[in-house]
Image: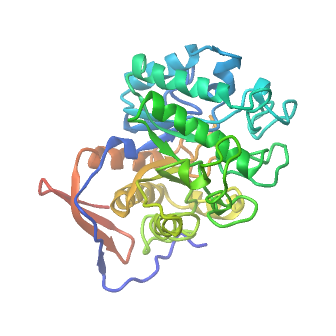
Amino acid sequence: MNFRGPAPVSPDFQPLVFPPTLIRKALFGFPSDNWPRTTATPPAHVASIGSVTNFADRLMMWSNFHTATNTINWAVLDTYVANARAAGVTEGKYQVYGTPAFLASTGAGTLGPYGLLGECAYPGNGDASLAQTTYFCTQFAQRNISTWGRFFTLISAGNEMDWRQTTGPLVFWWGTRAQYVDFSWAVRAAFEAADPAMRIGSAGTFQLYATDNGLDQIMNQSGTVFPTKTGKDVFEIFCGHPYGAGPSPAQPNQSGDFLSNSSGGIREARAFLNLYGKTMQGYIADEWGVSNSNDVGTVLAQFLAQSATFRSNFIERMFMMAPMQGCQGIYPWFHSSSGAGSLSGNWVTDTTGVINGYIQASTNLVGKTAVSGGYFKDGRVSLTFSDGTSRTV
């Protein structure tokens, strides 16, 4: 990995081919881990955030609200949505994750990846029909309409599914493939019945083809509670984790840009879905970082060692390029109030680096329709907009 020397591209300017693309504020996503939680201080880039996702935020997990049969307390989420809206955040993505311990069919006394008992269990304990899963999702959808003003626009079930069928802090699903199909179909069916306008995303996907955690393992898998449904039926929007994606082929990065990234990039995801007769209806990068957790010691370190200008340009160029390639939302992986442990840069103190790039991209892109553009061999990205203006970074 070398973030310094751009690969040569010929000709000097490489045009992109894309339809006129309106850049929405929702492109600028962020995890809810630090803000707008009920007590945390807003980060410097808060005004640029267009969409938030709850994953890895213990305050926002399913089990924090659904504490017993037919018992839900929405107080924390009510405050969260109010804070987000007051700060200008336009919408949210909710991940039905964090099985309540009283519903955990296995591992009710085992801590999951984020420290909750029963966190990744199949929620069928004494609930063979998944009635409580349906109850929670139905109540959530109804409150989203009646109280939250349809703040949440995208729902998914689970994260980076694991098929080892073991419990523990490093495994994101403790059940079988069939149980995952049943669980995720129950989520989709409940939300669509209560709110047909809700979009349904896949579980965050890091691997498309892998026996232990690949999405391919459930696409043709039938459920048991819902035997007529398979994994390819449980989602419409593809939620990928394209770690290592960079702005363009000319900008040094781990594994391609958002289009060509080898870890579930847009082109690969589209081809994958086509194999199962599905047409891509949207692509969300609901986790992104310059590094994944396996190579954080080298790749991220190299990125952080670059100048603040480099880091700022890298982030801004990324947000300029990705929507032209079909990405509708990017959530940089950030999971620490100190900035440590982030896989996408330090979003607490790097005000002239990644934070500046994020703010500049949002300020200069949101609300504009890109009609042409491309990238240069030195890594610069240029877009021209329908109002006659242009921007090159």
Kindly give the residue lying farthest to the bottom in the view shown. 10
Out of 338 and 50, give the one closest to the viewer. 50
**Which x, y percent locates residue 69?**
71, 17
Lateral position of residue 199 relative to residue 230, left or right: left
Q: Is residue 277 visible?
A: yes
Out of 261 and 319, give the one closest to the viewer. 261
The image's colour scheme reads rainbow
Against 153, residue 211 (above or below) is below
What's the residue at 33%, 71% (across, down)? 375
Out of 366 and 172, give the one closest to the viewer. 172
- Count of marks overlaid on the render: 0
User: Where's the C terminus, which quadrant?
Assistant: bottom left
Against 59, residue 319 (above or below) is below
**Which x, y percent locates residue 29?**
45, 42
- The quarter of the displayed image where residue 184 is located: top right
Against 255, residue 296 (above or below) is above
What's the residue at 81%, 54% (across, down)? 164
**Which x, y percent locates residue 191?**
50, 32
Lateral position of residue 262 relative to residue 119, left or right: left
What's the residue at 42%, 69% (across, down)? 248
Kindly give the residue lying farthest to the left in the view shown. 388
Lateral position of residue 107 relative to residue 50, left or right: right
Kindly give the residue lying farthest to the front in the view shown. 228
**Which x, y percent locates residue 42?**
49, 28
Q: Is residue 348 visible?
A: no
User: Where's the N terminus, which quadrant?
Assistant: bottom right
